[in-house]
Image (cartoon, grey):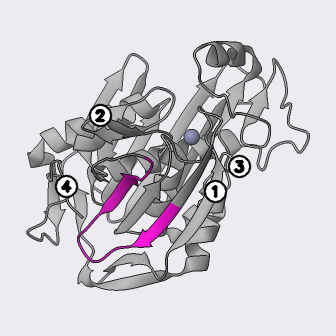
Amino acid sequence: MTLQKTIKSGFYLEGIGLHSGKNVRVHFVPRNDNQGIIFQRVDKPALPILTNIHAISDANFATIIGTNGTSISTTEHLLAALVGLGIDNILIEVDGPEIPIMDGSSSMFVDALLKAGLQALQSEKAYVEVSEPLSVKDEDRWIALYPYDGLKVTLTIEYPHPLIGKQRLSLEINPKTFTEEIAYARTFGFKKDLANFYAMGLAQGGSLENAVVLDDDQVINPEGLRASDEFVRHKVLDLLGDMALLGHPLRGHIVAHKSGHALHHKLVHSLMGEKERWVYRNATDLFLSDRKPPLTV
Ligand SMILES: [Zn+2]
């Protein structure tokens, strides 16, 4: 029997927001069984946000969650760390509109969470378990879900760039593989797109400290890549983070081709809407995927 997990003790983490460029402080707080992953803005009066389908707000180059006019951006790398480590219940308090970008990967979140220590709770872990295949597509981008005894991701990316081209990764996901093979992979972008981002008010805090930047044929960062296929590894990280929006850990095999946040969100909506294609394993009265705001904690 696998038990639900939280963290042993609370801690703070600070860093700048990728899009706002402002410093943000995050407080990680342990929670009890069946509470889920909850975000709370503490810089203004706001209701807590439970991470599930009802919290999906936008996918403008990041996964933005929110309820009742309050939102928190760039949650995906932190959510990936929680999903990757198998943390079910935690409160994330943040004093700004986005989660800090840290080094552009999940590494610093994973390190801090592991340093705080993980704590098993009393209740059995509940899952959204895929029982029938399902797929979503958007032009040449698609994602398919298949029944699988565990969690596995097979992902392909294709970029017309000499350093990326076509990259594919297929990996069984558990805390060990996530920590060793996925968590370190940084977000990446192209120098030619940066002017547009700045003009749109995005990426104000972006730098070579928190993103891999490519010009027409190479990586600009002096330290280079952390792996030749760091790009596909980061896309796996993003996908895992977005699967937190199911409200429970997923059991299934995700096969994705050129997917991004918008398509991940479409998958979550599609799966939640087709209840004959999945089962809720270890059901309790509190089905986190269905809980709508407002929420009290
Ligand atoms: Zn990302």
x and y, in percent, of residue 45 in the image: 33, 47
Disc 1 target residue = 14
Who's the residue at 13% across and 41% down the image?
Answer: 274
Q: In which quarter of the image is residue 38?
A: bottom left
Disc 4 target residue = 295
Q: In this view, does 194 lie above or below 26?
A: above
Are dots 4 and 1 in contact, CB under 8 Å?
Answer: no
- Separation of marks 4 and 2 at Cα, in angstroms: 14 Å
Disc 2 target residue = 69
Q: How crowded is mark 4: few (under 14 residues within 10 Å), some or many (20 or more)?
A: few
- Looking at the image, residue 229 sits to the left or right of residue 28; the answer is right
- Looking at the image, residue 116 sits to the left or right of residue 127; the answer is right
- The answer to which of marks 3 and 2 sits earlier in the sequence is 2
Disc 3 target residue = 103
Helix, strand or loop at label 1? It is: strand
Three-letter amino acid code at the position of disc 4 = Leu
